[in-house]
Image (cartoon, rainbow, N blue to C red):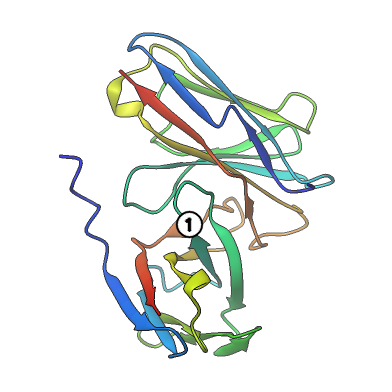
Amino acid sequence: DTGVSQNPRHKITKRGQNVTFRCDPISEHNRLYWYRQTLGQGPEFLTYFQNEAQLEKSRLLSDRFSAERPKGSFSTLEIQRTEQGDSAMYLCASSRGQGVGETQYFGPGTRLLVL
Amino acid sequence: GESVGLHLPTLSVQEGDNSIINCAYSNSASDYFIWYKQESGKGPQFIIDIRSNMDKRQGQRVTVLLNKTVKHLSLQIAATQPGDSAVYFCAENSGGYNTDKLIFGTGTRLQVFP
C-alpha cells in the first residue's frame, strides 16, 4: 500500500498524559499536513511542512502541541498534558508540494480518546 | 453534548438515481476546490477537484460544478450505488503565497437505499 499511513490507529489515554502520533506520507511527497476532526465536523487545519520546514501553524495548535518532520519524510505530532477536549481524529495528508493548491491525500487517521 | 454536530444535512436517494450535493464556500479568493468522500472510521478520500478557471469538470460517474458568482459548488453522482453511502465534504484552498491549507465545509451525509 503506497498511501499515507498513520500509527497508531487508536489511542486511549488519561488526562495529563503525553501522546505521540506518527504519519508516513506518500513516497516522494514533499508536503505534509496535519488536521484535526471532531465528530460530525469537517477536518480543521493544524499545520503543514514543506520537506522538513514547518511553514504554517493554526491558532488551534496550542503550546501543548508540537509537530516535527526532522528528515523531511515521516512526521510526528505530540500532545503534551492531554485534555478531554483533545479527543478527536487526527488526520495526516500529503501532496507533491510542487505548488499551491494540489490534491492532498489523507491517511486513515489516529483516533484519540482522552479519559 | 456529543449529539451536536451529528445532525449533518442528509440526502437520501434510491439506488440508481442521481445525487446532487451542494456546498457554499466562504472565500472569493479561493482558486482550488476538492470534493472528498469519508466513510465511517476512515480518512477523507479524494473524489474530484476543480480550479477556479473552470466551471465544470467530469470524472467517472461524478461531475463538479463551480459557480463563482454565488460561491457555490456542487457534486453530482450519476447512478448512485450503495457503496456511495458516506459523508461528503467540499474543501477550498485560497492559494495564497504563504498558505496551502484546505478549509472544509460541514459535510453532507448521503444515504443510498436499495
User: Residue B48 or B100: which is nearer the viewer?
Assistant: B48
Q: Residue A33: which quarter of the image?
A: top right
Callout 1 amino acid: Glu
| Residue drawn where x is 34% and y is 52% of the image | A41
- Is residue A100 shown to the viewer in this render? yes
Q: Residue furthest right?
A: A28
Residue B89 in the image: above or below residue B77: above
Residue A51 in the image: above or below residue B26: above
Residue A48 in the image: above or below residue B24: above
| Residue drawn where x is 37% and y is 79% of the image | B22
Q: Residue B25: which quarter of the image?
A: bottom left
- Is residue B93 shown to the viewer in this render? no
Horizontal side of residue B1 vs A31, given as left or right: left
Q: The C terminus of chain A lies in which quarter of the figure?
A: top left
Residue B41 percent across, percent down from the top left: 47, 46
Local crowd size for mark 1, using a 10 Å CA cut-off: few (<14), some (14–19), many (≥20) = some
Residue A28 percent across, percent down from the top left: 84, 46
Horizontal side of residue A56 vs B104, given as left or right: right
Instruction: Identify residue for label 1.
Output: B39
Horizontal side of residue B30 vs A27, given as left or right: left
Could you tell me which chain the residue with mark 1 belongs to? B
Residue A109 percent across, percent down from the top left: 54, 40
Q: Residue B15: which quarter of the image?
A: bottom left
Q: Residue furthest left?
A: B1
Task: Please tell me whether mark 1 sits on a helix, a strand or a loop.
Answer: loop
Residue B104 percent across, percent down from the top left: 43, 59
